[in-house]
Image (cartoon, helix red, strand yellow):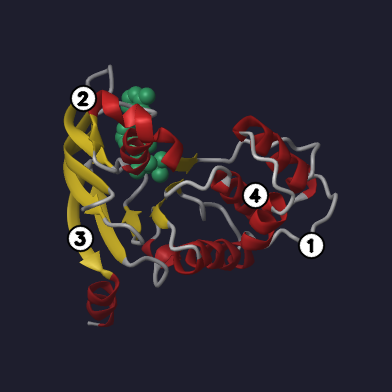
Amino acid sequence: MALVEVKNISFQYPNGYLAVDDVSFSIDAGENIAIVGQNGAGKTTTLKMISGLARPTDGEIIMFGYRGGGLKNIRSRVSCLIEAPGVYGNLSAYDNLKIKCKLFGIQEKSYIPEILEMVGLNHVGKKKVKHYSLGMKQRLGIGLTLVGDPDLLLLDEPINGLDPQGIVEVRDTILRLNEERNMTILVSSHILEELSKIATHYGIIHNGSLLQEMTKEELMKRCSE
Ligand code: ATP
């Protein structure tokens, strides 16, 4: 059974603009899906619908076997980072994670160090987040999405605006989460190259429509041709 089934979803903003138009795809457990499309293609709106921040104006989403109002039962299994991470600049990465752990009632001592290790921030100590590079902040944002052990991660443009080093670090983090933790991930970008090699499947979205779906191997073959 697919973890997520997106069936013919559309989203029309109140001003009448159809941002997502009849999009369907499914995500199996352990897959790392990349949605690629130009600015304004409808990526964020699609991720918002999957995360529950927006309700499709047409079509339906089935997740972990739940649909409609039943989706609230599994919201805690889905975690998202949409646009910039919400972090407290005057606190360290550890303390930012500690606040989220408190909200989730998590007390294990090893929990935060394990997340810091996973996102490569285990050596930053007490340094305040406001002094982090953009890539470090983004990795902390990904770390915060891991609190509560979600089964599905939604990352919207996590590589946007990063320098080459930051891009490599965030890509490595996404790969590790998928390969080592077997996390199912849906990640978006407007630059295909940024996500090349990290996803198992690719979807190309344009003007609100899903134009093509490809496996990593198909994408590599087509790029080489
Ligand atoms: P970007 O990378 O620029 O965020 P995107 O692919 O994520 O692009 P969306 O943010 O999903 O695209 O936006 C899709 C379309 O919907 C765009 O044309 C955008 O202008 C429009 N849109 C977004 N939010 C609203 C809104 N609140 N009201 C009306 N139109 C909107």
**Is the CB atom of the residue marked by disc 4 within 8 angstroms of ligand 1's nearest atom?**
no
Q: What is the CA distance from the residue labelled 2 to the residue labelled 3? A: 23 Å
Q: On the picture, is 54 further left or further right than 118?
A: left
Within 10 angstroms of label 3, few (less than 14), some, or many (20 or more) residues?
A: some
In terms of secondary structure, where does tag 3 sit? strand
For disc 4, the marked residue is: 140
Residue drawn where x is 29% and y is 72% of the image: 216
Q: What residue type is labelled 1?
A: His
For disc 2, the marked residue is: 57
**Is the CB atom of the residue marked by disc 3 within 8 angstroms of ligand 1's nearest atom?**
no
Q: In which quarter of the image is residue 212?
A: bottom left
Q: Which amino acid does label 4 sit on?
A: Leu
Front-most of residues 207 and 195:
195
Q: Residue furthest top?
A: 14
Name the spot of residue 8 as percent of width and height, x first.
14, 39
Q: What is the CA distance from the residue labelled 4 to the residue labelled 3? A: 30 Å
For disc 3, the marked residue is: 213
Name the spot of residue 125 as percent of width and height, x first.
83, 55
For disc 1, the marked residue is: 123
Residue drawn where x is 60% and y is 65% of the image: 169
In terms of secondary structure, where does tag 2 sit? loop
Residue drawn where x is 56% and y is 61% of the image: 170
In terms of secondary structure, where does tag 1 sit? loop
Q: What is the CA distance from the residue labelled 2 to the residue labelled 1? A: 45 Å
In terms of secondary structure, where does tag 4 sit? helix
Q: Which amino acid does label 3 sit on?
A: Glu
Q: Nearer the viewer, mark 4 or mark 3?
A: 4
First in sequence: mark 2 vs mark 4: 2
First in sequence: mark 1 vs mark 4: 1
Q: Are marks 2 and 3 in contact (CB under 8 Å)?
A: no
Where is 19 relative to 148, above or below? above
